[in-house]
Amino acid sequence: MDLDTTRRRLEEFLRLHGAGEEIAVSDLEPLMGGYSLVTTRFTVTTEAGVRTYVLRTDPPTDAALTHTDRHLEGELLRALTESGKAPMPAMHWTDDGTVLGSPSIIVDYVDGPQLLGHLAKVSDAEQARLALQLADAIATVHNLGEEVAPPAFVRPTSWDAYIDGFITEWRDLESSHVEREPFIRWVASWLDSHRPPPAPLTLVHGEFQTGNVMLSASGDMQIIDWEYAHVGDPRIDLGWLQQCAAFTPPDLIGIDPTGFCERYCRATGLTAELVNPLTIAYFSILSGAKAFGGLLRGIAEMANGRNHLVTSAYLVSALPYTHRLWRQATQSIEGAMLALQADMEAVR
Amino acid sequence: MMTQPSADRLLEVVRKELSDNLFPAITDPQATANLQMVLHVLGTIGVRVRNEIAWMCEEVAAAEELGASIATELPPAGPLTTALERLSLAPLVSLHLDDVAARYALGTEVLSCLLEQVPADHPRRGEVERLLDDRLAHEVAVMGEFALVGRS
């Protein structure tokens, strides 16, 4: 959809939502960074003043890398906005596509840098400070509990059922892919046989990474892009944060893994047995089933001629990159476990 | 047919033209990111055209040999036995890519069954893991340097 059409539709939409006849939408600018949704910043001028928002909308079907539910995301963002406790830009409106052309969400624009880009411009010491601030930010989300998630959200029946869901998802992903994928078959078996102790389930972001964190003008962290939010193990967010850092460094957990875990544990009340570098490494692999699975489907659709995206062609290389990460992570966990066993036997 | 210049050399020339002459002329950030992706994809194709037929044949042969050897030590009539039978019933009929890839899929299933069925404490587990690492080495050679475009 061209920007002028989007502008006219936004004006019509906002009039329908009480903005008055004297409304002007201007300065539309596509925002780079996300591979899944079309994101556009725009300014609204009314009698009440000037304000900037962000429109998140589904791309056309043949240009979609992943498929998520805007309605469900909208319900969650409404609940989080009403709670006033989540570190996120407030959501104002949703549209099922009737006026805006496709399912959409409109949220406040954060007038500050994306954390990922900002990290490249600051000192090591500032990165270390931001890492701890990030631990606090995601702990705030996890402290909201599962109660804040709307009724439409699926509640796992148990922690094991939650983990089983991911492992099944990995296996289903492999069996429905355009070709056989031995790394997924191997990693699913490995995840099944190396489960960490269970943690209480809560609301999780589902795609927590520095690319989805904005810094406001006052330095507060605002978490965006909640399309993969669900009720789950909080370590899934820490694992995904670390997994993404392997693609887009720096690794904020890796700066001081113990310090990060201690800060997070202090903020959530979870123990070091539950949240430590090894359990985060486990979840760094497990967490891939959600977003990486969508990526794999995008690649499969390109292979079958159902999408035409150079991004999908390019992201074929994300597969071997991830395979290598899995091998390194599992070898590191197994090495640490062997060392721990040897220490325990030496003590005996 | 002619073999010179090779396919990967032709791709290299195209990549250089895009990189040296077209890339600097582009100012649109999305187009710049897309061109970076195109350059990366062309690089991966260069490695594939040079190697993929040979690598697929070698990987299938290794999986078949190890699978047949270990199958005798595992319970009979399991998924590994089935995968090996399917592979043995599909001899390589040509070196055309589609034929090689079809057999590679069967060999991959043998490898997957080995990874799932050979226990972690089995004395030959290391050999199975090495097959996976050999496959990874080929994948990484195709991938080359990789860092997400447009995410920093």
Image: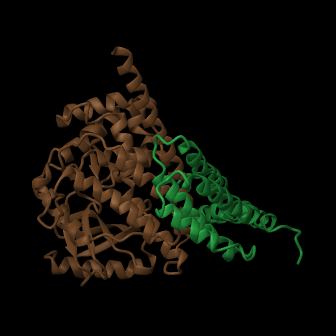
Residue A98 % position (x, y): 24, 84
Q: Any idea which chain is the brown one in this picture?
A: A
Residue A334, horizontal then vertical, whole percent: 44, 36
Residue drawn 53% across and 81% down?
A305
- Identify the residue at horizontal 68%, vertical 76% (top origin): B99
Q: Quarter holding the N terminus of chain B?
A: bottom right
Residue A166: image x %, image y %?
Answer: 32, 57
* On screen, residue A103 above or below A278: below
* Viewer-proximal residue among B35 and A241: A241
B79 lies left or right of A170: right
Viewer-closest of A73 and A168: A168
Q: Position of residue A276 (x, y in %)?
A: 32, 33
Q: Which chain is green?
A: B
Colour mapping used in the image: by chain
Q: Residue furthest bottom?
A: A98
**Numbered marks: total:** 0
* Residue A1 visible in the picture: no
Give the image quarter of residue A40.
Answer: bottom left
Question: Can residue B39 be seen at all in this image of the molecule?
Answer: yes
- In this rendering, is residue B69 above or below A57? above
Name the residue: 50% across, 59% down: B113
Of B148 and A222, the residue lying toward us: B148
The answer to whether A306 appears left or right of A281 in the picture is: right
Where is residue A61, by image quadrant? bottom left
